[in-house]
């Protein structure tokens, strides 16, 4: 790869962080799922009961099963169904972690436009993750 | 393509068809399931879903169609899960595919961070609104809109042309200010290709709609990203495809959080789907290295059309 085609420093750093977080998230996703279905920890909703609820809308599902919404799951990490959820959360958090990691590179280069884009993007993702914005329910 | 490969791919297509028909049969039990439980043991469902998405992953790669766009219409049409959970799982399928492909594409200089970030900011913000609207609207309305969108996607897939190296005589002011351009090594020509883009503001405007639909329907948006990046902005096809995959890792993340926080990502549906699709995609890449049958693309597109039609008719209360 010549100097002209070599990706920028920030692009390579983004790739490196994305690989680590993505692989870690996928590993935990699969591992957590086995903890869940093998019943290694107690579940909030027993696995054999899930098919009775998965044809309901999510708002009804939450109402009938008492499954936590937002970040309430964090206090229930001793449950199999919540552990299996951890990998999902890690995958959803991967991009924001990468952006925080490459922000110093853009700051070092004084790349004002991209510093601003990244800061707004990080804020948008954190706002989405915070649970403050959710859809209505039916 | 050798006869054995053709036979293998036809076998996969048939297996997918039989599985979806069988699932649709079980699906009709769905209302009874709520009252007295399914005749099918609970552990059969993740296995069926895993096998189904594994086959779907193979066909998606061979046909050159994104797995994310196949997942939601097909699984929502033929499995007994509520559309809310299918869309949540669909976002995770598209997201995990993008996360696993992203690092390699960025390192090889095919996905471009400077091109992706401004588009991703717009698409991801709009995907949050799409997800909120999708979860707020009645299921039949979302299902009808999904069906109409899928049929439109099929038409785009069937008719859209692609350009390997679009001509961009002059970069526009916005892309110049953002320094969106690059050089990559084109193996087929054995030389370095310089590229730049134009019509950036119009492209950004279109990404508002793409992001909204990705969030609302839980679809991967490669079917829309690639034509905009390639035909409108003028990025080379390889850069457009790779940047589109990487873009999904950000666009779908924002929408995924809305579904996650609402409780609409059920591990029992999402995890076997993610695992099946990723494994199938890897096998599909190996098959693709040996064969690229056009016929498979048309089988998959026809299947997608059928799923879109079923979603539309289901939403209108005519079928299922």
Image: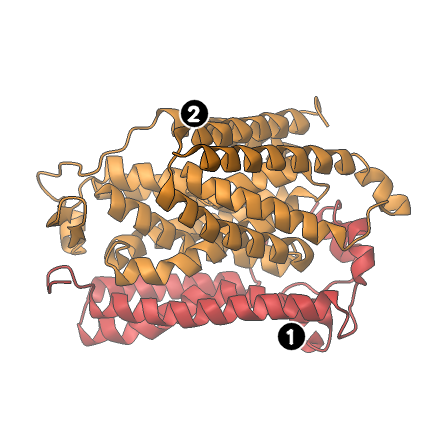
Chain colours: A red, B orange
Q: Chain of mark 2?
A: B
Query: From the viewer's perspective, is residue A125 above or below residue A54?
Result: below
**Residue B231 coordinates in the image, percent (x, y):** 25, 35
Q: Residues within 10 Å of mark 2 (few under 14, many from 20)?
A: few
**Residue B86 coordinates in the image, percent (x, y):** 62, 46
Q: Closest to the observer: B303 or B248?
A: B303
* Label annotation for residue A74: 1
Is residue B190 in view from this perspective? yes
Residue B109 horizontal side relative to residue B217, left or right: left
Q: Quadrant of residue B271?
A: bottom right
Number of marks in the rendered image:
2
Instruction: Find the distance from the CA under tag 1 to the CA under tag 2.
Output: 44 Å
The residue furthest top is B318
Look at the numbered disc 1 and give the secondary structure of its residue.
helix
Circle 2 residue: B155
The residue furthest left is B169
Residue A55 horizontal side relative to residue B104, left or right: right
Query: From the viewer's perspective, is residue B231 above or below residue B175?
Result: above
Q: Residues within 10 Å of mark 1 (few under 14, many from 20)?
A: few
Residue at (84% x, 44% y) in the render: B33
């Amino acid at each position: 790869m010549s100097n002209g085609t070599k990706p920028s420093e920030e692009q390579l750093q983004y790739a490196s962080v994305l690989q680590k977080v993505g692989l870690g998230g996928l590993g935990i996703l699969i591992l957590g799922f086995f903890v869940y279905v093998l019943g290694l920890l107690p579940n909030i909703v027993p696995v054999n009961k899930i098919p009775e609820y998965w044809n309901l809308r999510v708002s009804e599902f939450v109402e009938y099963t008492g499954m936590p919404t937002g970040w309430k799951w964090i206090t229930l990490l001793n449950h199999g169904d919540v552990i299996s959820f951890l990998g999902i959360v890690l995958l959803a958090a991967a991009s924001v972690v990468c952006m925080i990691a490459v922000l110093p590179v853009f700051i070092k280069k004084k790349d004002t436009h991209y510093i601003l884009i990244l800061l707004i993007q990080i804020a948008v993702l954190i706002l989405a993750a915070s649970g403050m914005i959710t859809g209505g329910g039916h | 393509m050798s006869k054995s490969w053709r036979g293998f791919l036809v076998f996969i297509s048939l297996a997918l068809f039989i599985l979806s028909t069988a699932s649709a049969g079980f699906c009709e039990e769905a209302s009874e399931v709520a009252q007295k439980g399914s005749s099918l043991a609970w552990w059969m469902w993740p296995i069926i879903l895993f096998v189904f998405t594994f086959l779907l992953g193979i066909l998606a790669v061979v046909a050159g169609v994104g797995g994310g766009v196949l997942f939601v219409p097909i699984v929502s049409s033929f499995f007994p899960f509520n559309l809310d959970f299918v869309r949540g799982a669909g976002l995770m399928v598209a997201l995990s595919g993008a996360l696993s492909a992203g690092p390699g594409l960025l390192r090889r200089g095919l996905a471009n961070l400077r091109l992706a970030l401004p588009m991703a900011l717009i698409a991801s913000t709009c995907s949050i609104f799409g997800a909120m609207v999708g979860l707020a609207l009645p299921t039949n309305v979302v299902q009808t809109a999904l069906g109409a969108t899928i049929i439109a996607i099929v038409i785009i897939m069937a008719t859209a042309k692609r350009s390997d190296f679009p001509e961009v005589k002059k970069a526009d002011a916005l892309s110049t200010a953002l320094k969106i351009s690059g050089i990559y090594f084109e193996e087929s020509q054995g030389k370095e290709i310089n590229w730049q883009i134009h019509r950036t503001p119009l492209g950004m405007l279109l990404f508002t709609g793409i992001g909204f639909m990705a969030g609302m329907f839980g679809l991967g948006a490669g079917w829309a990203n690639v034509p905009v990046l390639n035909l409108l902005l003028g990025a080379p096809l390889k850069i457009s495809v790779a940047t589109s995959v990487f873009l999904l890792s950000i666009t779908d993340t924002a929408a995924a959080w809305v579904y996650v926080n609402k409780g609409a990502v059920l591990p029992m549906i999402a995890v076997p789907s993610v695992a099946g699709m990723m494994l199938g995609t890897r096998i599909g890449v190996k098959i693709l290295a040996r064969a690229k049958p056009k016929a498979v693309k048309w089988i998959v597109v026809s299947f997608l059309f059928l799923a879109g039609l079923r979603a539309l008719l289901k939403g209108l209360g005519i079928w299922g």
